Image (cartoon, rainbow, N blue to C red):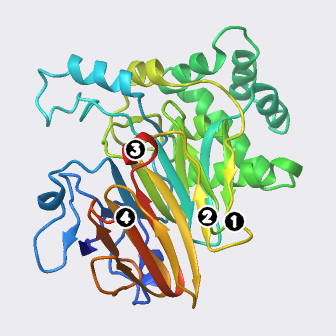
């Protein structure tokens, strides 16, 4: 069975008035449009055309959540737990009311994520930079007391980044944070060589979040710029934040988030540090296929799989396993199955194929993303 899906954009403050509107070919919105959810999550299940919401079809058992994400300003720095950490946290907080502001765990699942850029430029912070590289960057900043304090702490032994992030978020480093941010802004106004783009991004973030210690946490992270069709996979424990741009995001069906700055919301520093993975290094960029219609974005989890299909007038048939979504992101495209006739998919909407469908045929001229369970879940 094939079902047409839509949903109303969520109006988070960091959303854009133009990105989703531009994708769908409509005038700018009157307020921010941040995310469109295609899934059965109880907070915002997708609408089935003419007949209720998707959770009534799936029973709330879909293992993934597919989204369109449109960021005009930076999201909070955050990290998500492993399955084991989520289960332990869920059990610890079982007695807390769901609306309790001190509650960190909304379910007992992990939340790995994949983001793929739809805009020509999508900026993010992904993972922690190796300390020697950050020390080289800091050499470009003036010799203020805050920069000196950060350099000293980064030069210690042990689990340095966990200690430094804890110090920055503790509230005890306000003066140092202000000094470091001022130095970043000054350096961003001049040619900083290989660090020009990074310092410019962090300086811009500081304008949006003045006085927020997360600005200095951002200075410790990899600044990643994706081009259209490129993506990054964000594993459990990996510190990350989206800065700007339009993308397709897919994640495990979970709402577990620990924040690490760039937010007015509560930050549980101790819990954040307990699940943070301080392994450093670049996060690999996943690039679209140069040949053929289908790009598979390889991810090491079984909650979801994502494929990008570029259509140019020729039909493309794909094998599917488990409940599948086809999200249209460009052009004029349609889908049919072995049991159902062809139906168009307007850009910005999706078609859901129930688990009994095993093959989908895509046609038209444009682009779709195909989401399904991954790995062991489809066997």
Give the Cα distance between marks 1 and 2.
5 Å
Q: Residues within 10 Å of mark 1 (few under 14, many from 20)?
A: some
Q: Of marks 3 and 4, which one's residue comes earlier in the chain?
A: 3
What is the residue that sits farthest to the top in this orientation?
Answer: 157
119 vs 143, nearest the viewer: 119
Residue identifier under label 4: 358
Give the Cα distance between marks 3 and 2.
18 Å
Left or right: 350 with respect to 170? left
Q: Of marks 4 and 2, which one's residue comes earlier in the chain?
A: 2
Q: Secondary structure at mark 1?
A: loop
| Residue 303 numbered mark, or none | 3
Residue identifier under label 2: 295
Q: Position of residue 158 (x, y in %)?
A: 67, 8
The answer to which image quadrant residue 54 occupies is: bottom left
Q: Quadrant of the N terminus?
A: bottom left
Residue identifier under label 1: 289
Q: In the figure, 52 relative to 311: above or below?
A: above
Q: Secondary structure at mark 3?
A: loop
Q: Are the two marked residues, 1 and 2, in contact with CB atoms closer than 8 angstroms?
A: yes
Left or right: 291 with respect to 38? right
């Amino acid at each position: 069975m094939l079902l047409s899906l839509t949903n109303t954009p969520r109006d988070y403050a960091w959303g854009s008035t133009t990105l989703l509107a531009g994708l769908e070919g409509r005038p700018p919105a009157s307020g921010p449009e941040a995310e469109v959810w295609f899934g059965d999550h109880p907070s915002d299940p997708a609408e089935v055309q003419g007949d209720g919401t998707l959770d009534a079809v799936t029973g709330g058992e879909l293992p993934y959540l597919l989204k369109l994400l449109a960021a005009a300003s930076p999201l909070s720095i955050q990290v998500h737990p492993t399955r084991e950490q989520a289960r332990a946290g869920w059990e610890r907080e079982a007695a807390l009311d769901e609306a309790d502001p001190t509650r960190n765990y909304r379910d007992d699942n992990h939340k790995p994520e994949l983001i793929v850029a739809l805009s020509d430029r999508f900026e993010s912070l992904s993972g922690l930079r190796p300390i020697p590289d950050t020390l080289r960057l800091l050499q470009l900043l003036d010799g203020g007391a805050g920069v000196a304090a950060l350099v000293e702490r980064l030069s210690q032994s042990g689990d340095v980044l966990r200690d430094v992030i804890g110090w920055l978020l503790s509230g005890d480093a306000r003066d140092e944070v202000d000094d470091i941010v001022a130095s970043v802004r000054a350096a961003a106004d001049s040619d900083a060589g290989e660090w020009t783009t990074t310092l410019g991004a962090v300086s811009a973030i500081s304008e949006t979040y003045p006085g927020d210690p997360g600005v200095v946490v951002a200075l410790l992270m990899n600044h990643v710029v994706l081009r259209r069709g490129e993506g990054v996979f964000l594993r459990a424990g990996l510190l990350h934040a989206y800065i700007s741009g339009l993308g397709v995001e897919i994640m495990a069906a979970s709402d577990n988030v620990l924040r690490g700055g760039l937010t007015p919301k509560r930050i549980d520093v101790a819990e954040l540090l307990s699940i943070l993975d301080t392994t450093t290094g670049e996060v690999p960029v996943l690039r679209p296929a140069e040949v053929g219609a289908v790009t598979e974005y390889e991810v090491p989890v079984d909650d979801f799989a994502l494929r990008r299909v570029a259509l140019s007038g020729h039909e493309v048939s794909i094998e599917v396993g488990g409940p599948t979504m086809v999200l249209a992101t460009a052009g004029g495209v349609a889908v049919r199955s072995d049991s159902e006739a062809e139906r168009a998919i307007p850009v910005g909407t999706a078609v859901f194929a129930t688990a009994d469908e095993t093959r989908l045929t895509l046609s038209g001229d444009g682009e779709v993303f195909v989401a399904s369970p991954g790995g062991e879940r489809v066997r």
